[in-house]
Image (tube, rainbow, N blue to C red):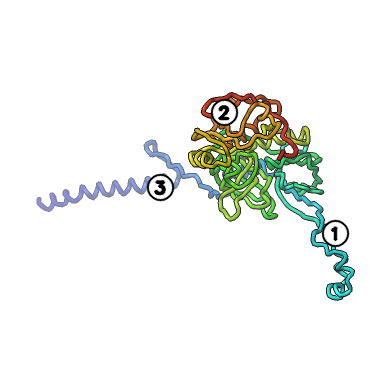
């Protein structure tokens, strides 16, 4: 009896185990053979995953390579780069190293140096390279004045390899802007942007031909805006954009771009020995000057006829203590007029040496550079209201701007 109970106690688990094993075998057979019972869930094989190259992705429907988007610099350069040109300028100058005839006729001199000295050229050709960019289909190119200064011949080289003889339409030394014109079909052009809303930290891209290395691209940020010419050691009527995008000799006249590939400035200056200090003319200034050069071949520039210096406590003390100047001022800020040119617009309006300019067309004045820039933005014939402090009293002056003279009076 006990033996039969023991057998039945072990027999029941063996039956359950056998049924479980049979179920596993039937399930495996159903999957392999494709037979599925109503209670079995279909097993869907995973799709094959195609490998993707870092450079391109595969479109499985069209089996065609799709380019992966690159960064903003590549996009900007692709849009603007074809319209950036290399400018080769040459000029013929007299050879100042000519040997006087009196020495050439001396037998002893000829014995030592030979007859070849007589064949020394009286003239030599100086060559320079710069950059520029095409602004319209008519072939007008903006560049720097110093790139084409005194040039007898100008050759423009496009990125597509075309070499075209250029003509200097006009040049303005005070802003370092010049315009060259070329004649050709299918000229690429740049898109002009704005520098008015720039802030330090905005992206900046420079394209040009530094040191003869054509189509060089550098990138950085806008480091500062409103840099005055005196701060960077040049004498120009420009408020510069500062950038740390690398600029070298040969970049002059090339464009400074924003991240959209629009021109926001004209690269023009570097500080020798410094790193990460490049300067560009705001595009609004370059456009205004270029428009006049294209239309008239010269720039009509407003002129008041004063020389001035920014007033601060140090300047005030120095002026008041210098008996030779004969000037006494009570203001700690403003712009001191140190000279009024005879028969100039300022003289006709009643301006006097020792006046301190405090307002210019209702705008508060703090620096001499500020006055210079405000005058630069005016046209010949514009009437300007200035407020000056004279002996502690406020005096209003109405000045009519005249044409800047070809030669500044002594």
Q: CA distance from mark 1 to mark 3?
A: 104 Å
Q: Which of the two labelled residues, at mark 1 and mark 3, occupies the earlier sequence position?
A: 3
SS assignment at label 3: helix
Q: Which of the two labelled residues, at mark 2 and mark 3, occupies the earlier sequence position?
A: 3
Q: CA distance from mark 2 to mark 3?
A: 105 Å
Q: Residue 88's spot in the image, x, y percent?
A: 76, 50
Q: Nearer the viewer, mark 2 or mark 3?
A: 2
Mark 2 Cα within 10 Å, few/some/many (few <14, many 20+)?
A: many
Q: Quadrant of the C terminus?
A: top right
Q: Which of the two labelled residues, at mark 1 and mark 2, occupies the earlier sequence position?
A: 1
Q: Is residue 315 above or below residue 302?
A: below
* Residue at the image position 56 percent from the left and 48 percent from the top: 244
Q: CA distance from mark 1 to mark 2?
A: 56 Å
* Residue at the image position 57 percent from the left and 53 percent from the top: 274
* Residue position marked by numbered label 2 in the rendering: 388
The quarter of the displayed image where residue 353 is located: top right
Q: Nearer the viewer, residue 255 or 25?
A: 255
Q: Disc 1, disc 3: CB below 8 Å?
A: no
| Mark number displayed over residue 122 | 1
Q: Nearer the viewer, residue 22 or 111?
A: 111
Q: Residue 96's spot in the image, x, y percent?
A: 80, 59
Q: Residue 177's spot in the image, x, y percent?
A: 70, 41
Q: Residue 66's spot in the image, x, y percent?
A: 60, 43
* Residue position marked by numbered label 3 in the rendering: 29
SS assignment at label 1: loop
Q: Nearer the viewer, residue 181 or 49?
A: 181
* Residue at the image position 34 percent from the left and 47 percent from the top: 24
Q: Is residue 326 left or right of residue 173?
A: left
Q: Is residue 112 left or right of residue 397?
A: right
SS assignment at label 2: strand
Q: Nearer the viewer, mark 1 or mark 3?
A: 1
Q: Nearer the viewer, mark 1 or mark 2?
A: 2
């Amino acid at each position: 009896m006990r033996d039969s109970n023991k057998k039945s106690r072990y027999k029941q688990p063996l039956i359950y185990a056998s049924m479980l094993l049979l179920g596993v075998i039937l399930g495996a057979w159903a999957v392999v053979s494709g037979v599925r019972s109503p209670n079995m869930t279909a097993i869907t094989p995973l799709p094959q995953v195609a490998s993707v190259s870092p450079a391109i992705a595969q479109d499985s429907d069209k089996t065609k390579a799709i380019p992966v988007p690159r960064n903003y610099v590549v996009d900007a350069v692709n849009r603007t780069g074809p319209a950036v040109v290399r400018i080769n300028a040459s000029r013929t100058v007299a050879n100042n190293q000519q040997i006087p005839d009196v020495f050439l006729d001396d037998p002893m001199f000829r014995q030592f140096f030979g007859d070849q000295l007589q064949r020394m050229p009286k003239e030599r050709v100086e060559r320079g390279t710069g950059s520029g960019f095409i602004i319209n289909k008519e072939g007008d190119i903006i560049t720097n004045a110093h790139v084409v200064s005194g040039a007898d011949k100008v050759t423009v080289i496009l990125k597509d390899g075309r070499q075209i003889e250029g003509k200097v339409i006009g040049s303005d030394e005070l802003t370092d802007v010049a315009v060259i014109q070329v004649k050709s079909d299918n000229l690429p052009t740049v898109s002009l942007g704005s520098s008015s809303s720039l802030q330090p930290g905005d992206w900046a891209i420079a394209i040009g031909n530094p040191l003869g290395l054509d189509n060089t691209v550098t990138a950085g940020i806008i480091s500062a805006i409103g840099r005055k010419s005196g701060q960077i050691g040049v004498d120009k009527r420009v408020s510069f954009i500062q950038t740390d995008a690398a600029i070298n000799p040969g970049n002059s006249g090339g464009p400074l771009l924003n991240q959209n590939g629009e021109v926001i400035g004209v690269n023009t200056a570097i500080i020798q020995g410094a790193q990460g200090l490049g300067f560009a003319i705001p595009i609004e200034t370059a456009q205004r000057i270029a428009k006049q050069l294209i239309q008239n071949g010269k720039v009509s520039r407003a002129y008041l006829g004063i020389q001035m210096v920014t007033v601060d406590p140090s300047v005030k003390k120095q002026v008041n203590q210098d008996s030779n100047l004969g000037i006494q001022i009570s203001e700690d800020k403003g712009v001191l007029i140190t000279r009024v040119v005879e028969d100039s617009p300022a003289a006709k309006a009643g301006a006097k040496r020792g006046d301190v300019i405090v307002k210019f067309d209702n705008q508060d004045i703090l620096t001499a550079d500020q006055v210079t820039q405000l005058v630069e933005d005016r046209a010949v014939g514009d009437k300007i209201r200035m407020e000056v402090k004279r002996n502690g009293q406020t005096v209003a002056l109405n000045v009519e701007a005249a044409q800047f003279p070809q030669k500044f009076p002594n």
